[in-house]
Amino acid sequence: MALGWAVTVYIISENEPLHSKWLPKEISMRPKMGFTFPWEVWLRNGMRSQVEKSIYDFPDDNELGLNMKNCRSVWQMFLSHAPGVSWSRVWAIYVLLRWYNENIYSG
């Protein structure tokens, strides 16, 4: 049976990592650098309507005891790039509201 693709298997010795054959040493031997997800961009753009719906549709009088006026203010400050209001504050509010709506609220 023809699959239309082929797999090449390389033997890797403990003394010579596979990446060292193709990459310069300054790249292959550098320390791990990590990766950051672009939450701020996602919240301001692709997820914006979802976040706004969650924040503005959540009742002011709620059993969580959240002050929704303050939550909406945090959202607006985030959108206006106010100092000290990072994506993580908005994300925490959004996740709590979504979790509540999907797991607790039965309306």
Image (tube, grey):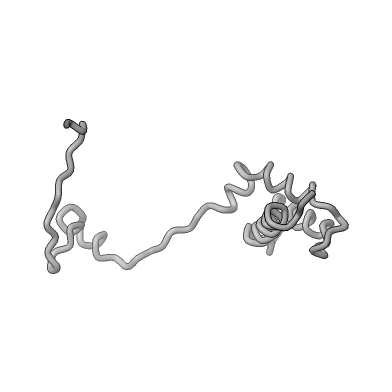
Residue 20 shown left or right of residue 69 in the figure: left
Residue drawn 17% across the image and 38% down it: 6
Residue 61 shown left or right of residue 23 in the figure: right
Residue 11 placement (x, y as % from top left): 11, 57
Residue 91 placement (x, y as % from top left): 64, 57
| Quadrant of the drawing holding the N terminus | top left
Residue 81 placement (x, y as % from top left): 68, 54
Residue reaching furthest to the right: 61
Q: Nearer the viewer, residue 104 or 80?
A: 104
Q: Nearer the viewer, residue 14 or 43?
A: 14
Looking at the rendering, which quadrant does residue 100 occupy?
Answer: bottom right
Note whether residue 81 is visible: no
Image label count: 0
Residue drawn 50% across the image and 55% down it: 37
Looking at the rendering, which quadrant does residue 90 occupy?
Answer: bottom right
Q: Nearer the viewer, residue 103 or 73?
A: 103
Residue 68 shown left or right of residue 41 in the figure: right
Note whether residue 94 is visible: yes
Residue drawn 13% across the image and 64% down it: 16
